Amino acid sequence: MIFSGGKYVQKYFILKRIKYFYQNFKKRLLPDGNSFSLLKVSNSMIYIACFACVNLLSYMLMWKDKRAARKGTWRVAEKYFFILALAGGCPGIYAAMKAPIYHKTTKPAFQFGIPLLMVCQIILFLFIIVF
């Protein structure tokens, strides 16, 4: 688009286009004009995202600990794995025990403790949903 009249007119037209784009954006994405209705998330979506993050973190921490065990460097304390497991990271830790990592598979606290904790969490979750 060719503008005439110098820099002032060009800036005016650019600002006018930005304002038009913003108003169009506001009409499409903000029907009520105040909040992002497309970005509203329910509480269950937040819980699922937190659950996924805790499990990903626990899996990555198991992977890091396995790597440190092979190299003979600083290791992650087991209490941190159990703290993550209590926070809902049992599936991530269990997957790290059974997946290609095969870490902490001979320790009884992990062999029996993590699956037992996972079952207790599932029962608690079902109890909360039902009652």
Image (cartoon, rainbow, N blue to C red):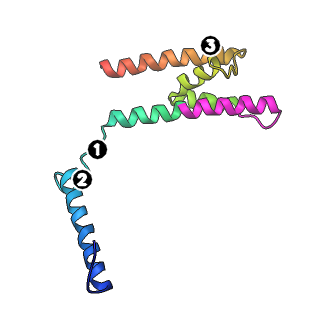
Cα distance in 3D space between marks 2 and 3: 48 Å
Q: Quadrant of residue 76?
A: top right
Q: Position of residue 124 (x, y in %)?
A: 42, 20
Q: Position of residue 120 (x, y in %)?
A: 49, 17
Residue where numbered disc 3 is placed: 112
Q: Is residue 61 above or below residue 32?
A: above
Q: Is residue 127 above or below residue 3?
A: above
Marks 3 and 1 close (CB-CB < 8 Å): no
Region in magenta = 56-76
Between 20 and 34, the one lying in front of the other is: 20
Residue at 21% in and 65% down: 20
Residue at 20% in and 62% down: 23
Q: Amino acid at mark 3?
A: Phe
Q: Is residue 96 magenta?
A: no
Number of marks in picture: 3
Residue where numbered disc 2 is placed: 35
Q: Is residue 36 above or below residue 106?
A: below
Q: Amino acid at mark 2?
A: Ser
Residue where numbered disc 1 is placed: 40
